[in-house]
Amino acid sequence: MQPVRQDPRSRNRATQIVEKWQQTGNRVLLESSGAALEVSAYGVNMLRFRFSPNGIFEDDFSYAVVQKPEAFEGKFSLRKVGDEFHVLTDELVCKISNSLNIRIFNKAGQLISEDERGFFWEPYPQKGGNQVFNNRKIQEGEHFFGLGDKPTRLNLRGLRFENWGSDTYGYEKNSDPLYKNIPFFMGLHSGLGYGIFFDNTFKTRFDFGHERSDICTFWSEGGEMSYYFIYGPELMSVSEGYVYLTGTPELPPLWALGYHQSKWSYYPESKLMSVANEFRIRKIPCDGLHIDIDYMDGFRCFTWDRQRFPDARRMLQDLLEDGFKSVVIIDPGIKIDKDYAVYQDAMAKDMFCRRADGPVMEGNVWPGSCHFPDFTNPEVREWWSGLFKDFTKSGIRGIWNDMNEPALFEIGTFPEDTRHDFDGHPCSHRKAHNVYGMQMARATWEGIKKSIYPNRPFAMSRSGYSGIQRYAAVWTGDNLATWEHVWIANIQIQRLSISGLSFCGSDIGGFIGRAGGELFVRWLQMGAFHPFFRTHYSGDYGDQEPWSFGDKWTALAKKAIETRYRILPYLYTAFWQYTSKGTPIVRPLSFIDQNDPETLFRMDEYGFGPDLLVCPITKEGDEGRLMYLPKGIWYNFWTDLEVEGGEEVFVQTSMAEIPVFIRAGAIMPQYPVMQYVGEVSFDAMPLHIYYLHGTYTSSLYEDAGDFYGHDQGNYRLRTFELEGFANKVDIRQSWEGRFNPEYTTYKMVFHGLPFIPAGMLLDGKVVMFSLDYSAEKGSFTMEVDKKFEHLSLMNLEGFAD
């Protein structure tokens, strides 16, 4: 990466005073002889800043942003105050100087963020256009988070990064750039959290005080200086605002949250079927089986090798009948072969990228010489999506896009002069590179959605730009089977989640190398508490299924996977929160309590959904570790031991588990163990209730787990309010939606009660009840009708009252 020169003589900036200004609806335009600035309101806490060096703005187009300023109906005004222009919403005061320097305050007058030199630019005569820059002051005690999949420490202060999607095989700690391009970061100081989304698809760079300790800079090799400012002040709200801006995904099918098994590659058919059979014989749960590139005929996309898979339709149907959903890989490279129908059709319809001087762009990947569809062309996306109609009707339930950075052998990626349509904004690969994978995933997702309807689609993508969450789950790429990569995966999943990509996971056990039993189990235990739960490995170093390391490790692997299936209703509820509000599923400690200074530097512990706290084991031989619990009361998930948060504690574990805690007051639904989603029906839904002396609210979201009935109201959202006293606990339940699950009762398990229950009121009536007591955990279990509205459980004193 080239260093940033901070010599002001090497940069141009707006030095003339503002000469003209006007407000039109939710937009303000300020113009000087040196530059122009447009400010738009996208919400009371969200402003867009768009600069032009010459007063001429490009056509306003974005692959990332789905919201429009016209949708905002709140207060927005412009005032001239002395030599400044004040842009105001109900929550923000933006003060702009005559030279277009910007300071942003909240309504209480606290400074949130400010320019140092602000916007400046430099002509780029070698390649055309301008390089555009923004310099901001780093506030005292400021911390930075975000930027997607960067494999480095969670707090970005003092570091520098580049966004240029790259196939980084065997990446290591601090490798940069990587597969994804998420130009969104968050800042936090003085308890004030904010975010900046730099919507620029060229190669972009970010410096968080690396070159100058008091300056944060972001810049690009081309395009426009256009960025969105999102104020919290809570970091959680900032992340939600970013997903609101760039789009929430659809709810995935419930099976996609189960366990997935993958290898490069399971073939022939007999090998794949033997793996499937082994899962069922050993009663190890599994929903997804992934089929890598060797299923294809000579790596030709949308084909099957008839020698290895003589009857793919029958095989896929057999797998479906046994509960397995097949996910197959599709790469962007289309083999140059005049006898290959997909190639013939693409050539006839001019679907491929071309070089600047006319010929179709050619590059080498797995099939050999290939051409590549221009997924930035809407006609190409429509053509590509149509290819799935016949391909998936045999029983495929998901598609996995790889090599879409885009990656080429030998030269890395497409030549810069490769041309792209960019949805009617023709450009070179310099501008389209970082969105290529996202637009491939978009076309793939749209194709699957149409072809397997009324089932919900499942798509995965290795690369992506901001907004990729609308189309695909993501994974962290070609990692290594090392203990360091357990740590790296933990950090990457936290960072991806708060950067809008909550449906994320890593290749459990490592793609490159062989894990060994302990490493595999520890990674699997962590992965059970990540949103996407898949083992994937190259196969060059030996097998890596849950039973590959001997009976001891098989039993522990089975327990980890069963734990995942038990918490599926809790996780599905967290996915509903993510898809409806943009709430990240995995949360760093700083997102749980940003006002606790200790949380700003912790990296191993993370929140999983609203109520679970997880801390992986990342060192060989450890059966316990130090970890920090945020303030409040927490229960050990395995033992029910109560722990007071706000300090570092040593948590003793075993090889069978990692430290997991649940927040006091939480009401957590659980499933019975099942071999795949939908296998088991049950009459009683377990509800685990964790006593709190105080009040707390929990949710349970349910629908059919597939299909689209929830869009027409066929869902059930339950809200539980717990209020705990010294001698009783009250639970109130309300709900909305018309979905009616099969179970009829709740199996309520009370943890941590400070009293022995002696009486119960159910919807205002005294009722007889029976309790099962667990001496090991000190818990009480009872069953009640799922339709109750108010339950009070109390001791004799409380009952007398």
Image: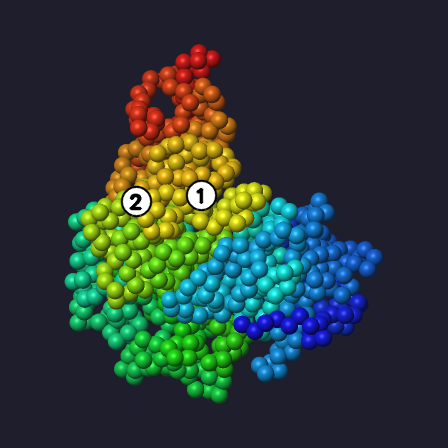
Q: Vertical placement of 597 versus 381: above or below?
A: above
| 702 on left or right of 648 | left
Tell me the crowding category of disc 2: few under 14, some 14 to 19, or many 20 or more residues within 10 angstroms, Cα based. Answer: some
Frontmost residue, 651 versus 72? 651
Return the x and y of residue 77 as percentages of the image width and height: 73, 54
Frontmost residue, 662 versus 241? 662
Return the x and y of residue 314 as percentages of the image width and height: 18, 61
Tell me the crowding category of disc 1: few under 14, some 14 to 19, or many 20 or more residues within 10 angstroms, Cα based. Answer: some
**Residue at x 69% of width, y 72% of height:** 7
Q: Vertical placement of 674 versus 294: above or below?
A: above
Assign a secondary structure to mark 1: strand
Return the x and y of residue 124 as percentages of the image width and height: 62, 79
Q: Vertical placement of 609 versus 162: above or below?
A: above
Residue farthest to the right?
82
**Residue at x 27% of width, y 41% of height:** 673
**Residue at x 20% of width, y 61% of height:** 272
Assign a secondary structure to mark 2: loop
Disc nearer the start of the sequence (1/2)? 1
* Residue identified by numbered label 1: 627
| 270 on left or right of 354 | left
Colour mapping used in the image: rainbow
- Three-letter amino acid code at the position of disc 1: Met
**Residue at x 69% of width, y 76% of height:** 10
Disc assigned to residue 655: 2
Q: Quadrant of the N terminus?
A: bottom right
